Image (tube, rainbow, N blue to C red):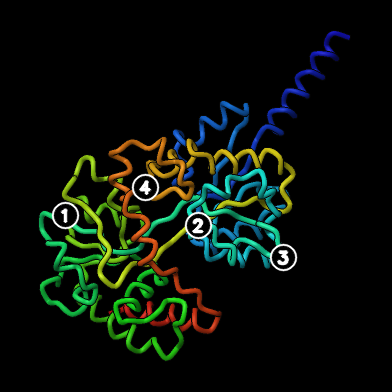
Amino acid sequence: MRTILLATVAALAVTGARAAELNALVWCDHTDPALIEPFEKAHGVKVNLKEYEGTGTALSLVEQSRPGDWDVFVIDGIDVPRAIDAGLLAPLPEAELPMADIFPELVMAENHTRDGKTYAVTEKFGYNTISYNKAKVDAAALADVTALWTDEAFEGRIAIYDYYLPVIGLVAMGLGKETAELTADDLPAIREALIAMKRNARSVVDVVSSQTVLATGEVDVLVGGGEWVTAILAAEQPELDWMIPEQGAVRWSQSIGIFADSEKKDLALEFVKYILSPEGQARLATSSCYWAMPANAKAGAVLSDQQKAALRWDDQAEYLKRAQLYPAPDGDLDAAMQDVWTEMLQQ
């Protein structure tokens, strides 16, 4: 009898261990133990994290998974409608979330809500703009973003972030265009500017290499960079900085939601609430992968003065006014933009 009882207890322990797990598809900033471990300890759970780059990759992972395999989804803010339309996200109990503390520009109801229900919340944001070495480049030389493709003085001194939407958006703004109003008729001028900028570029780089090329001095300027590149490096290399040119910057944001077929929605909600709390936001904002602005304004009370300075906390009201969102092209325009980008890469 004792053997049977012990076996039963052991089986329950294993079942409980399995139940006390949460599976999340995330960006790399969520993989920092400093962010995840406080939640795990507070709730006695294990958070299993799968890092990905690009919404297409995440959707492929979901398609290859069984219903219920995933609980939490961190996704590019502009792609939330796509996830809602695909039936991937569950409605969130907005009354349990700190919506009143989110910067108003980051609520993004047009992306996050459908038929009066909220499916995701912005958790972090920043700018695709210009990162640079201020010991080698005067900020005044970068005030007009068009200099990056018209001024030969930058030849061999710049790198381009390898993501077509924000860089095309930044170029479009330099040409006096609105990112939300781009059409196929705008692409010839954008193509010409991109190819000219590529002639000045030493390299086209991914997220990790974006930090490396600046930190090692391989280039002096990163097109498409921002606080997410240099804020984490500033303590050891204060010469690395970022700025917004007179034409403005492209604003990116990432959102968090719960998978519709999650079997642990209550635990997933607790995780979302933790990430959106001032403490969770401060840890997320200063993650070891990359830094960026927290969406919850109350995180400012948790961040240090040095951290807020690196993130330009006091400048956000002005920056938000001068920023435009990523282009959100339909299928045909998106394909045309990718064709232009591929042609630029091949130059």
N-terminal of the pair, mark 4 or mark 1, is 1
Q: Residues within 10 Å of mark 1 (few under 14, many from 20)?
A: few
**Going by the image, does 58 lie left or right of 34?**
right
N-terminal of the pair, mark 2 or mark 4, is 2
Confirm or deny contact between disc 3 and disc 1 (CB under 8 A). no
Confirm or deny contact between disc 3 and disc 4 (CB under 8 A). no
Q: CA distance from mark 2 to mark 3?
A: 20 Å
Residue located at (19% from left, 68% from top): 142
The residue under label 1 is 217
Q: Is residue 296 above or below residue 5?
A: below
Closer to viewer: mark 2 or mark 4: 2
N-terminal of the pair, mark 3 or mark 1, is 3
Query: Which residue extends farthest right?
Result: 1
Q: Position of residue 9 (x, y in %)?
A: 78, 18
Q: Is residue 241 above or below residue 17?
A: below
* Circle number at residue 115: 3
Q: Position of residue 204 (x, y in %)?
A: 29, 66
Secondary structure of residue under mark 2: helix
Query: Which residue extends farthest top?
Result: 2
Q: Is residue 24 above or below residue 338?
A: above
Residue located at (68% from left, 28% from top): 17
* Circle number at residue 291: 4
The residue under label 2 is 104
Secondary structure of residue under mark 4: loop
**Going by the image, does 262 lie left or right of 130?**
right
